Amino acid sequence: MTLGSNVAVRLVMLGPPGAGKGTQGARFARTHGLPKISTGDILRDAVQAGTEMGRVAREVMDAGRLVGDDIMIGIVRERLERPDADAGFVLDGFPRTVVQAQALDGMVDEKAPLVIVDIEVPMEILVRRLAGRKICGSCGVGAPPGAAVCPKCGGALVQRNDDNENVVRERLLVYERSTQAIQEFYGRRGTFRSIDGDQTEDSVAADLAAAVASALGARR
Ligand code: AMP
């Protein structure tokens, strides 16, 4: 199944840390010429830039907990108001709470409803993936497994502050606690789909494209 280039896609990627939301969201966004909006990336940029928001977020992120809803909703509202998000977007890492999900509904109109895709991956695979995950110390981009240097700028790879084992466990616990409520919030919508994230990157990408096409088709 393929999508026409003129179809506005407002895609919400759900799934635990390490499920591949970032990788798959970036790939889908590139293919369809959409901005990928990652709240984790926005926060990490703020931390690196040393802004007030970055200082507040840093401690919370390093402990694996969630940054406050008001801050997150403000960040996303501001980002979605930029013109490049008019024709659609891919959201990665937001919403993480029902309050955020309700706020997001208020930010988008009825014309192009949200498509929500949940990437499912078993817990033991997530822990393994997160412990081995590396990002670029210079530009922050995620590196593919086994890469020696950053594929984008050649910079040295480092582990994310919040990918060490204790914080990983806390992040997965935080995710488990909030996920049920989010799934209940979105689960009954005709545009909600689940896909299997424990496959090759290409297979997950194909399933994601098919899920989005089917969700958009279902509402016509
Ligand atoms: P991520 O890169 O999506 O795993 O996010 C990294 C960290 O940023 C999370 O563990 C949270 O501390 C924070 N964060 C990112 N997005 C959100 C959100 N929507 N709500 C609350 N905290 C967030």
Image (cartoon, grey):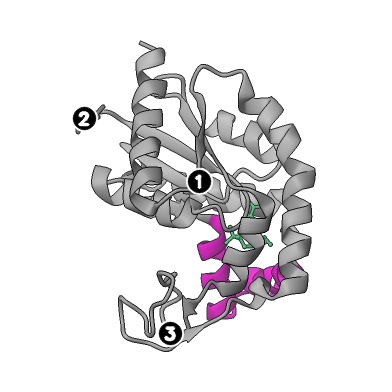
Tag 1–tag 3 contact (CB < 8 Å): no
Q: Quadrant of residue 101?
A: top right
Q: Residue type at mark 1?
A: Gly
**Residue beneath disc 2:** 6
**Residue beneath disc 1:** 197
Q: Residue at x 69, y 73 (%)?
A: 58
Mark 3 lies on a secondary structure that is loop
Q: Quadrant of residue 148?
A: bottom left
**Residue beneath disc 3:** 138
Q: Nearer the viewer, residue 204 or 5?
A: 204
**Range of magenta residues:** 39-63
- The numbered mark, 2 or 3, whose residue comes first in the sequence reads 2
Mark 1 lies on a secondary structure that is loop
158 relative position to 172: left or right: left
Q: Residue at x 61, y 43 (%)?
A: 95
Residue 205 screen position, x and y as percent: 36, 44
Distance of label 1 from label 2 (alpha carbons): 27 Å
Residue 164 screen position, x and y as percent: 69, 76
93 relative position to 154: left or right: right
Q: Is residue 59 visible?
A: no
Above or below, comparing residue 29 to residue 218 in the picture: below
Q: Residue type at mark 2?
A: Asn
Q: Residues within 10 Å of mark 2 (few under 14, many from 20)?
A: few
Q: Residue type at mark 3?
A: Ser
Above or below, comparing residue 204 to residue 18 in the picture: above
| Residue at the far bottom in the pictured view | 156
| Residue at the far left in the pictured view | 5
Q: Residues within 10 Å of mark 3 (few under 14, many from 20)?
A: few
Q: Is residue 48 magenta?
A: yes
